Image (cartoon, rainbow, N blue to C red):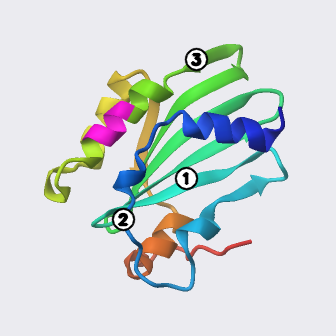
Amino acid sequence: MSGTGHAKAGVAGLGLAGALLCAAPASALTLAECERTTHISHGGEADHMDHGDGWVSWTGWWEQEGSYAELHVAQCRDHRLAVSRLKEERIADRTFDRRRAGGEVFERHMRRSTPLRAIDELAEQLTAAGGETRLGPLLDEPCACAAAYPGARGDLPPFELN
């Protein structure tokens, strides 16, 4: 299967509910434009979603002599990012698929009212569900933040669509 086909199958497995998608404010960049191949047919970003109040998510994927799917969740206004590897195949001799468990944790957290959401807690819950999760500051503006919350960039280097 081609890299793009595999990525679509991997991304769909996250089960992110379309009902969670909120309309993004008008800007020069749209969430649809954020879906792209970032590494010459081997990797990319897909399924960008705005969850309201500065929260966005997307899936990162890779496929070349191995594959993975990662859930990226950013709190654009607080400049925080959680990345959870939920699927891996033939990378470092490991194979696992935790997309269902990670997707359920993510959806449950996003159903909370926005004042009750906490990216630290989400990262802990994703880790408990088996995902290898990293939590840290945004180092530059992600495409989804640029599209949905262009005023939240602050001092971050701006996103540029290549």
- Residue at disc 2, secondary structure: loop
Query: Where the N terminus falls, by quadrant?
Result: top right
Question: Disc 1 residue type?
Answer: Asp
- Ranked by sequence position, the earlier of labels 1 and 2 is 2
Q: What residue would you read off at disc 3?
A: 96
Mark 3 packing: few (<14 Cα in 10 Å), some, or many (20+)? Answer: some
At a point 57% along the width and 79% down the height, the residue shown is: 29
Question: Disc 3 residue type?
Answer: Phe
106 in relation to 119, above or below: above
55 in relation to 160, above or below: above
87 in relation to 2, above or below: above
Q: What residue would you read off at disc 2?
A: 22
Q: Which is more toward the observer, 139 or 20? A: 20
Q: Nearer the viewer, mark 1 or mark 3?
A: 1
- Residue at disc 3, secondary structure: strand
Q: What residue would you read off at disc 1?
A: 47
At a point 63% along the width and 53% down the height, the residue shown is: 45
